[in-house]
Amino acid sequence: MLFKSPRGTKDILPQESGNWQRIEEKARAVFSLFAYEEIRTPIIEESKLFSRSLGDLTDIVQKQMFLIKKETDTFVLRPEATASIVRSYVENTLYNVAGVSKFYYMGPMFRAERPQKGRLRQFHHIGCEAIGSYSPYLDSESVYLASKIISALGISGHDIIVNSLGCINDKKSFALNLREKLLVHKKSFCEDCQSRIAKNVFRVLDCKNRQCKDIVLSLNLGASRICGDCQKHFDQVKAGLDLFGVNYQVNPLLVRGLDYYTRTVFEITHKNLGSQDALGAGGRYDNLVEELGGPARGAVGFALGVERLLLARGESQVQEEQGSVLHCYIIPLGDEALKTCLKVLQLLRDNGIRSDLDYLDGSLKSRMGRADKNRTKFCLIIGDNELAKGTGILKNMSARTQEEVKLSEIVKKIGET
């Protein structure tokens, strides 16, 4: 029987993993510049954590969570990281630490969605959360940070869209008003949106269905609908973005489908991604810490999809970066030569030279072919003649040249080239 990876998951093969590592390394460097520190939370959490934080009627909680039942306990594979990090912040009383707590994370998330380009059932997020401040300029910094990471990855042509949902009371008023307007056109919406009007009305604004989008646009929902304090906060967010030199657009129809978002929300999109065009998204969630048992604390964060970052970078760049260069590939010719080659291999590695040994038999031509496939810079061949002289034949694989080199000088020779 041939086993396959579960639908909606993907193996990250060795020739691809280098691209993932480079994205992670560059993101870590930018997070460090902004004074964020890494946090790692469990992949499984209690299911109630997400029904409480995301909202019982969200698509994630209703349809997309992977449940794990063990006796009387119900766990889920985490569908997102914000709730997990806030849970950890409260559980470990990190609110007693002075100042703003800044966390970043990387890892897999899980949602039982219909798999498609840029959307898998196991997907990966790079994100961050800043907890402990209500400052609108922290919102601006968060948007700037997300943009900075994307730019550091060599991705251009992305768009930054911002909006304010207002406070809890603003959201309630808008939800009532929006539902009233949408009900007039209910039968013209897609089946999902007809359900959302009753259960999670903001999700209608996110629908990608052309007819649904046209109806929403016809309702002229762009008029200001947030209170004076929230408008002042949003004006300061935009002022901060201007100071940081961030190019952005304001879209009054931008919402986030999760219950915990208040005030600032933002999304970063890219035209290369098709209908699922979001590279990442985030926003402010000032009530979540208190809702999960902690003190009142303002917070803001975002997440970027690693798979979508890879797509946005483009196939040509991915192909160029596939695999890692091997500095030296050693070919022993005979059993006695093999023993010496093992010692040389150890010597090279001890001196920080990435090396490997040909452990397979075959003709010299076939073994040289393996060296080529390993993208090696040098190939070192040692046979009986070389053993007698304490030397090896060092082939420069790109220049197609070779020379006899003393094994005692092999580290120096490879290191100089």
Image (cartoon, rainbow, N blue to C red):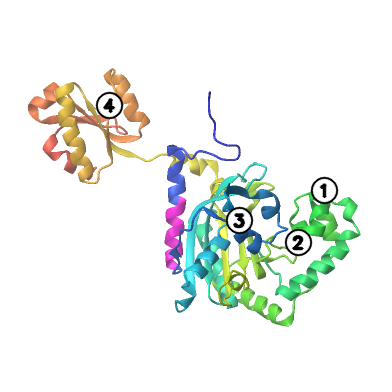
**Quadrant showing the C terminus:** top left
Measured in 3D between alpha carbons, the distance from the residue under mark 1 to the one under mark 3, in whole angstroms, is 27 Å
Check disc 3 and report the residue beneath it: 47
Q: Nearer the viewer, mark 2 or mark 4?
A: 2
Q: Could you say where residue 182 lies in the image, as x and y percent from the top left?
A: 86, 60
- First reached walking from the N terminus: tag 1 or tag 4: 1
Q: Secondary structure at mark 4?
A: loop
Contact between labelled residues 4 and 1, with CB atoms less than 8 Å apart: no
Query: For this rendering, which residue is in front, 365 or 60?
Result: 60
Residue sitting at 55 percent across and 58 percent down?
A: 81
Check disc 1 and report the residue beneath it: 191
Residue 150 in view of the camera:
yes
Check disc 4 and report the residue beneath it: 359
In the shown orientation, is residue 350 left or right of residue 122? left
Q: Which residues are magenta?
A: 23-33
Query: For this rendering, which residue is in front, 208 or 76?
Result: 76
Query: For this rendering, which residue is in front, 110 or 363?
Result: 110
- First reached walking from the N terminus: tag 2 or tag 3: 3
Q: Nearer the viewer, mark 1 or mark 4?
A: 1
The type of residue carrying mark 4 is Tyr
